[in-house]
Image (cartoon, rainbow, N blue to C red):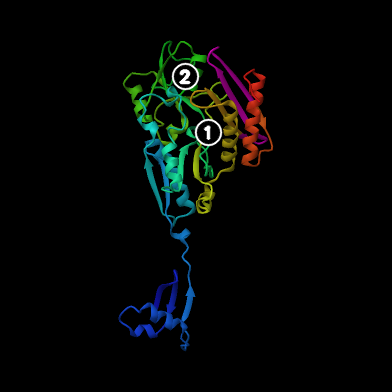
Amino acid sequence: MALIVAINGFPVFVATARLAQKTLAPTRAEVLALVAAPVHPRPALVALPVDQKLTKKLIIGARGSPLSLAQTQTVVAALKSSRPELAIEVRPIRVSGDDLASPAQDLGLKGLFVKEIEKALLAKEIDVAVHSAKDLPQDLPEGLILGPVPPRASVMDALVSLKGFSLTNLPKGAKIGTSSQRRAFLLNLQRPDLTIVPIRGNLQTRLNKLQDGSLTGLVLAAAGLERLNLLDYPQVVLPLERFTPAPGQGALALEIRAQDAWVKKTLAPLNDEPSALSLAVERGAAKALGAGCQVPAGASAQPEEAGFRLWLMMTDPQKQKGYFSQSLLEGLDTVPKAQAAGWEAAQQFRRQNGLGGQ
C-alpha cells in the first residue's frame, strides 16, 4: 500500500504492507511509529517537498477592451506553446482611461490605461500585467519592472478608408479621425486642409464611423488592425520618416514584480531580443524627448544588420513645425545599453534643432 501524509509540513511517501491490513486511515502517531520502526523489509521513505512552481497558476491582468484581450491571448498562446502544463487565468481590469469622455491627451494625463493594473500587480492579485507598450509611462512604480518582450507587431501608422485613399489623394477638407495628438499634428503638418476629428472608442466603434459616413478616414496603429484581424478595410501605411510612430507602438510590455523569480523564469521563453532592444531604444529616446500625452513626439527603432535605425520626431506646435531625424545606433547588445543610446541620440537631436537638451 502507498500512502502520502504530511509530517512537519512536508509530504512523506510511505509504502508498507502493514498498513494494508487497516481499513481506516492511520493516525499521525501510527505513521511516525511506522517510519521509525525497524521493519523488514524496511518501508520505503521518500520526502517529496512540494514544488509550487509546477502547480501554481499564472494570473495575467489586462484591460478589458477587445484589443487588449486579443493581444493578451497572443501571450497566453506563446506561454502554452512553451509550457503546455501551465495553468493560466486572464483577469480583465477596468482602468480610469475606460471612462474618459475625451482622449487622454486632451486631459494632459499619462498612465490612465495602466494605473489600476499596476495596483493589482503590486497587491499580488495578478502575476503579470500586459500593456500596449506605448501606453506605459517611462517611470514605473517602485517594485515593478519590464519583463521579457514578445515579438513585435507592425510599428506603423495606417490611413484607413473605404476607398483606399493615400494621404496625398484624400479629398480636400476630408474628415479624418484620430485619438492621438501626434497623429493630428502630423496630419495638419502635411495636409493642413484636412478636418481632424478627435475620436474615442474601441477599434470597431471607430471603423463604424467610416461605414456611416461620419468620417472619410482614420489614422490608426496597423498593429491593432492586425491583432483584431480587421484587415478587410483598405489601409495605406504611412512612412516612418514623415509619420514617425509613438515610442513602443506595436510592442507589448509585460510588467512584473522585480523580485518575482518564478514569473521571470516562466515568461523568459517569450523574449524576442530585437523587439526588446528596439523597445529599450525607444523608451530611452522618449524620456529625453519628453514624449507623452501632451508632447507630440515620435521614436521608432528598427533592427538592421549593422544595428538599429532610429527615427525621431519632435514638434513645435507654436510654430507649426516638425523636426525629423534618423541615425544608426551600433553595438547595442543589452537593454541598458540600448536605452542609454536612445536617450543620448534624442538629446543630440534636441540640441541640433535648438529644442533644448542636456
Is 305 left or right of 209, judged from the image as shown? Answer: right
Which residue does the image show at 33% across and 23% down from the upper left?
A: 211
Identify the residue under disc 1.
248
> How many C-alpha atoms fall within 10 Å of the one at disc 2: few (<14), some, or many (≥20)?
many
The residue labelled by disc 2 is 184
Type of amino acid under label 1: Gly
The residue positioned 41% from the left and 25% from the top of the image is 103
Query: Quick check: 52 above or below 201?
Result: below
Q: Earlier in the sequence, mark 1 or mark 2?
A: 2
Asked whether residue 101 is drawn in magenta, I would say no
Secondary structure beneath dot 2 equals helix
Whole-percent x, y for residue 159 in the image: 45, 23
Locate residue 273 relative to residue 221 in the image: left or right: right
Query: Mostly what secondary structure, the magenta segment?
Result: strand
Q: Quadrant of the C terminus?
A: top right
Q: Give the residue type at disc 2.
A: Ala
Q: Position of residue 134 (x, y in %)?
A: 50, 32
Q: Is residue 339 above or below residue 12?
A: above
Q: What residue is shown at x 30% (from left), y 81% (from top)?
A: 23
Which residues lie in the magenta part?
Answer: 303-326
Q: Measured from the top left, where is residue 229 in percent x and y?
A: 40, 35
Q: Is residue 14 left or right of residue 289?
A: left
Q: Are marks 1 and 2 in contact (CB under 8 Å)?
A: no
